[in-house]
Amino acid sequence: MNVTVLYGGPSAEREVSLVSGKAVAQGLRDAGHTVHEVDVRPETLEAALAKPTEVVFPVLHGTWGEDGQLQAVLEARGVRFVGSGSAASRLGMDKAATKMAWEKADLPTPAYELVTNANPVTAVRAPCAVKAVDSGSSVDVYICQNQADADKALQTLLDKHGRALVEQFIKGPELTVGLLEEKALAPIRIVAKVEFFDYEAKYKRNDTEHRFDTGLPAPLIERCKRLVEKANSVVGARDLARVDVMIDEKSQEPYLLEINTLPGFTSKSLLPEAAGHAGIPFAQLVDRLVKRAAARAA
């Protein structure tokens, strides 16, 4: 099959996308596909799509590539592509809108407020997480244990983006659950050697532990998997995704944090690791994804 792999993009997560995209392209070649690789930006997309292809595999993170803009162009052109459509991508990229959708569906997520320059006051107090509303890879995320740090982080993000999400901090184990074809894979417990599983811990450090042996009761793990599948369905994500979950250490209740509709494919990325744990090697994983996309109506 002829597959065009798009990577790079204009966002702050460009570096991760370049590594992920190269890995996907090689995996597809290993699976026997003919691959056309493109380091793409909005202004070069037209040229990138000029080459005939059967499926596009976007491996882009952040603004434009993951937030529904690219997907809307592909849909308008009738191009088959891997991953969520424009509506689900747009919703999943907006942390506040996603949490609102989950709340309406009676799914548990930490208390939060969307703070803007026009309304810069929040009732959510430290300890809390202060996040950019539409960034991934833990870019512009601050874990604040005291109110002074929270106020400083909030002002930083308001100055930079004009809005921010302030979220109640849940203390306890952190899980991430990959989804393949809308089914939850085995949860991975993240054990970072730093206070917060940030960009550095995700992609730079080599001491972050990914544990399939979570140390948590089996019924709780199954509950998390079913919860994540419902959360994915509410967003409308398809093919692949990853949902982050916190377990309150006192109540043992799970809380949904956010969804990633285009997870990474680097050597440290969690979705390929979970697929591998399920007996699906990397080349087979990307092969399944492009074949599923090819089977969809344009």
Image (cartoon, rainbow, N blue to C red):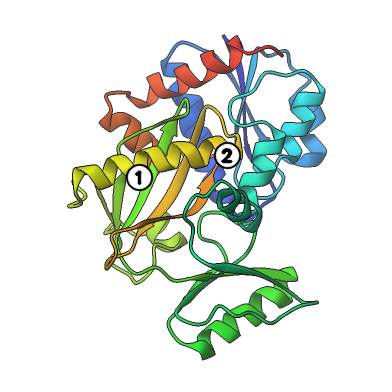
**From the image, which quarter does the C terminus lie in?**
top right
Whether residue 246 sits left or right of residue 97 in the image: it is left
**From the image, which quarter does the N terminus lie in?**
top right
Secondary structure, mark 2, is helix
Instruction: Please tell me which residue is depicted at 71% across the width and 37% down the height of the picture.
Output: 87
Residue 31 position within the rendered picture, expressed as x and y whole percent measured from the top left: 42, 14
**Which amino acid type is marked by label 2?**
Val
**Residue on which disc 1 sits:** 224
46 shown above or below 50: below
**Residue on which disc 2 sits:** 234
Residue 112 position within the rendered picture, expressed as x and y whole percent measured from the top left: 57, 68
Residue 107 position within the rendered picture, expressed as x and y whole percent measured from the top left: 49, 50
**Which amino acid type is marked by label 1?**
Cys
1 and 2 marks in contact (CB < 8 Å): no
Instruction: Please tell me which residue is depicted at 79% across the width and 30% down the height of the picture.
Output: 73
Instruction: Please tell me which residue is depicted at 38% across the width and 43% down the height of the picture.
Output: 177
**Residue 267 visible to an observer of this rendering:** no
Whether residue 142 sits left or right of residue 177 in the image: it is right
Whether residue 172 sits left or right of residue 26 in the image: it is left
- Please give the label number shown on residue 280: none
Residue 183 position within the rendered picture, expressed as x and y whole percent measured from the top left: 41, 29
283 shown above or below 118: above
Secondary structure, mark 1, is helix
Q: Residues within 10 Å of mark 2 (few under 14, many from 20)?
A: some
**Residue 292 visible to an observer of this rendering:** yes
Mark closest to the chain's N terminus, 1 or 2? 1
